Every structure is written in structure tokens, then in C-alpha cells.
Amino acid sequence: MPRKMKKYEDDLLTRLKDQDYAVEYLNAVLEDTGDEQQERFLMALKDVAKAHGVANVANESEVTREALYRILSDKGNPELATLLSVLAALGLKIRISTDIAS
């Protein structure tokens, strides 16, 4: 009997439930600079939100589910306070560092 292949998205969402994996996933997107970086980051954040349940993230961040989908769309442009609220709902936060090697 042939092995059933998992859908890539299903596997990704399973892995993104792990906090450390989600952090690496989002950081990898941020490190890849260039055109459409914001859109790629918001898509990646939407993947993480899906893994944790969009309705749960919306509730925890005090944003409606519909608004959360809009915010995390490729046309999304969330305010910093909203982005921080969504990240906090996922147990994540933004950290700033220098680009200069020590």
C-alpha cells in the first residue's frame, strides 16, 4: 500500500504550533529582505495564526476574526499596536538588534 502524502500546509501548520519553530519561521522571513517583505511577513504570520486557530488569536488580541484576516492579507497594513497585540496573542514579541557584527 503506498504511503499517503501529507499536504504541505497541514504539515507546516502542525510544525508552527511549536513556539520555537514559529519563531524561526518568522525570523527567516524577516531576514529575507527585498521586495514585498511586508507581504511575506504578514503571510507567514497568518500561517502561525492559522496553526494556533485564527478565532483564538483574534479573541486574545481583541481583534475581530474578519479584521485579523484583513490585517494579515497581502494588502494588510496593520498599525504597530495591532501587530503587537496579535504577536502577544501568539506568545511572541518583536525584538530589535543591530546589523553590525560584534
Image (cartoon, grey):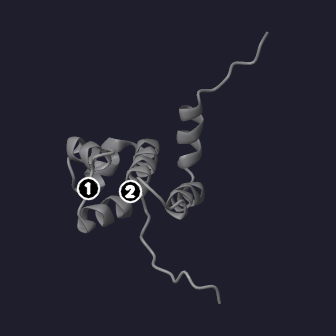
Q: In the figure, 81 relative to 76: above or below?
A: below
Quadrant position of residue 99: bottom right
Residue at left offset 42%, top offset 69%: 93
Of the numbered discs 1 and 2, the one sitting upstream in the chain is: 2
Residue at left offset 31%, top offset 44%: 73
Quadrant position of residue 38: bottom left
The kind of residue tagged 2 is Gln
Find residue 90 and name its label. none
Farthest residue, direction right: 1
Q: In the figure, 67 relative to 87: above or below?
A: above
Identify the secondary structure beneath mark 2.
helix
Asked if the residues shown at circle 1 and circle 2 are in contact, with their CB atoms under 8 angstroms apart, the answer is yes
Per the image, the residue denoted by label 1 is 77
Per the image, the residue denoted by label 2 is 38
The kind of residue tagged 1 is Asn
- In the visual, does 46 lie left or right of 24? left
Crowd tier of the residue under label 1, counting other residues whose Cα lies within 10 Å: few below 14, some 14–19, many 20 or above:
some
Q: Quadrant of the C terminus?
A: bottom right
- In the visual, does 11 lie left or right of 51? right
- In the visual, does 64 lie left or right of 27? left
Residue at left offset 24%, top offset 67%: 81
Farthest residue, direction top: 1
Q: Position of residue 71 (x, y in %)?
A: 26, 50
- In the visual, does 96 lie left or right of 68? right
Q: Looking at the picture, tell me which residue is in the foreground, 22 or 61.
A: 22
Q: In the figure, 61 relative to 99: above or below?
A: above
Q: Looking at the picture, tell me which residue is in the foreground, 29 or 22.
A: 29
Q: In the figure, 39 relative to 99: above or below?
A: above
Crowd tier of the residue under label 2, counting other residues whose Cα lies within 10 Å: few below 14, some 14–19, many 20 or above:
some
Identify the secondary structure beneath mark 1.
loop
